[in-house]
Image (cartoon, helix red, strand yellow):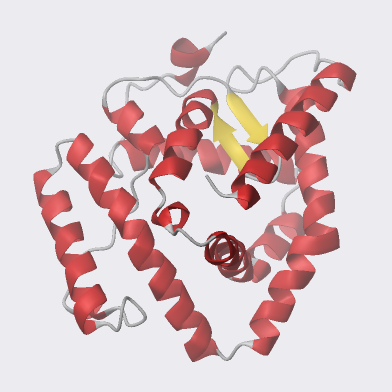
Amino acid sequence: MSLFVRKICMLCVGVTVLVLQGCASVPHPDARDPWESMNRSVYNFNEALDTAAIKPAAKAYKAVLPSPVRTGIHNFLGNLGDVWTMANSALQLKGQATVETFMRITVNTFLGLGGVLDVATEMRLEKRKEDFGQTLGRWGVKPGPYIVLPILGPSTLRDTLATPLDIKGDVVQQFNDPATRNVLSATRVMDVRSGLLESIDVIKAAALDPYTFVRDGYLQKRENDVHDGNPPSTFDYTESEAP
């Protein structure tokens, strides 16, 4: 694991411990979010960090790099991410998805200049996103309580426990040169954050409580992700994850 990732993990643990020591409980927490006080504190920490450092850096990234260059970087990083998606598709026994993702990687790597060009999408090979948290959910592991992680943001207990393996399985972490790993990791953050500049501002301006808006949206999306957009109508979050 790269030094960059280790530092991020250590910071996450440190901030979480400090917040746990200082937060008070919410009188009537949402059943999905029994640690709301801690989560709100971490959420506020993340917001402060984003305002002070990540958002300005993402704006600079967007301003300095022309759109075609940013698109190429996005495609390249997405092609690397497809490798872990393929592995998790296989673990979930999704044969068609596994084969199509393998074809995406092959086409984009060899015909798309290492993934800079997304030729596979032009060939109508669907792009998917699978991680180990989804794999656990596919095999019946319940999401557990909602958690906001320092820097990493919204998660659940299940997804948090899956995060170390997701990091280990990330192709970026397989590069031997530490400088390359760190640059690619930082560039991915800029790529993701720059793509959310407008939408996050809209959420903050429109939502009465951005925290609950983000929480509800994340939990709904993760349930849709696990069930490929078709969550069971009988799913009851309170039964599956109440502590």
Residue at horizontal 32 percent and vertical 49 percent from the top: 84
Residue at horizontal 67 percent and vertical 44 percent from the top: 8
**Can you say whether 50 is above or below 187 in the image?**
above
**Image position, residue 148 (x, y; %):** 66, 34
Residue at horizontal 80 percent and vertical 13 percent from the top: 27
In the image: residue 146, left or right of residue 230: right
In the image: residue 35, left or right of residue 52: left
> Relative to the observer, which residue lies in front, 204 or 243?
243
In the image: residue 68, left or right of residue 91: right
**Image position, residue 169 (x, y; %):** 38, 44
In the image: residue 33, left or right of residue 135: right
The quarter of the displayed image where residue 38 is located:
top right
**Image position, residue 158 (x, y; %):** 47, 25
Q: Is residue 125 visible?
A: no
Q: Quadrant of the C terminus?
A: top right
> Relative to the observer, which residue lies in front, 12 or 158?
12
**Image position, residue 218 (x, y; %):** 53, 41
The quarter of the displayed image where residue 6 is located:
top right
**Can you say whether 112 is above or below 152 in the image?**
below
Q: Residue furthest right?
A: 22
The number of discs equals 0
Residue at horizontal 28 percent and vertical 62 percent from the top: 127
Q: Residue furthest front?
A: 176
> Relative to the observer, which residue lies in front, 120 or 2?
2
Q: Is residue 239 visible?
A: yes
> Relative to the observer, which residue lies in front, 205 or 165?
165
